[in-house]
Image (tube, grey):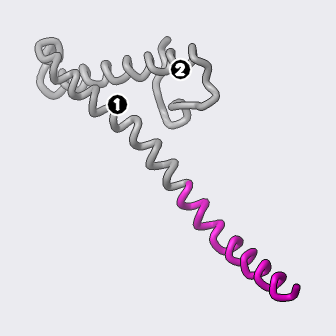
C-alpha cells in the first residue's frame, strides 16, 4: 500500500478495523522511511542501519507529534465553536429569564 499521509488522510472515526490496521501500517512505514532518510541525509549513507536506536527514537517523536497535532487542532475547533456559542447562549438565558419574570 503506497500512500503518503497528509492532513486529509490522517484518521477517520468511521474506519473499519481493517482500514485502521492499514492506516497504522502506513503511519509506521512513513515514520520509518522518514527516520532513515533524514538520518542518512544528516549523517551519511548507511548511518541509520548502524544506529537503529536513533531510528527508533526518531519514530517515537514522529508518532508522538502525529497524535498530538490533530488533538490540538480539535481543541482549537472546540474553543472556536464554544466562543461562537457564547453570545447565542447568553441571549437565550436572557430571554428565558424575561419569560420566567413574566409568568
Question: Outermost residue toward the front?
Answer: 103
> In the shown orientation, is residue 68 left or right of residue 88?
left
Q: Magenta part of the protein: which range?
A: 78-103
Is 102 situated above or below 45?
Answer: below
Real-space Cα distance between discs 2 and 1? Answer: 15 Å
Residue sitting at x 28%, y 26%? 59
Of the pair 88 and 46, the residue shown nearer to us: 88
For label 2, the crowd category at 10 Å Cα-Cα, with few meaning under 14, some 14 to 19 and many 20 or more, is some
Q: Is residue 98 magenta?
A: yes
Is 71 situated above or below 95?
Answer: above
Residue sitting at x 66%, y 74%? 87
Q: Secondary structure at mark 1?
A: helix
Question: Outermost residue toward the bottom?
Answer: 102
Q: Earlier in the sequence, mark 2 or mark 1?
A: 2
Task: Give the labeled residue for mark 1.
Answer: 63
Label at residue 20: 2
Q: Secondary structure at mark 2?
A: helix
Of the pair 10 and 74, the residue shown nearer to us: 74
> In the shown orientation, is residue 20 left or right of residue 57?
right
Count of labels in the image = 2
Residue 24, image x, y percentages: 45, 20
Is 72 situated above or below 89?
Answer: above
> In the shown orientation, is residue 46 left or right of residue 31?
left
Residue sitting at x 55%, y 54%? 77
Amino acid at each position: 500500500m503506497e500512500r503518503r499521509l497528509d492532513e486529509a488522510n490522517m484518521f477517520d472515526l468511521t474506519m473499519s478495523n481493517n482500514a485502521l490496521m492499514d492506516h497504522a501500517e502506513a503511519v509506521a512505514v512513513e515514520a520509518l522511511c522518514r527516520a532513515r532518510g533524514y538520518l542518512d541525509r544528516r549523517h551519511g549513507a548507511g548511518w541509520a542501519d548502524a544506529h537503529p536506536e536513533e531510528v527508533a527514537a526518531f519514530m517515537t517523536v514522529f508518532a508522538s507529534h502525529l497524535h498530538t497535532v490533530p488533538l490540538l487542532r480539535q481543541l482549537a475547533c472546540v474553543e472556536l465553536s464554544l466562543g461562537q456559542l457564547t453570545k447565542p447562549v447568553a441571549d437565550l438565558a436572557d430571554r428565558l429569564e424575561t419569560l420566567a419574570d413574566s409568568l
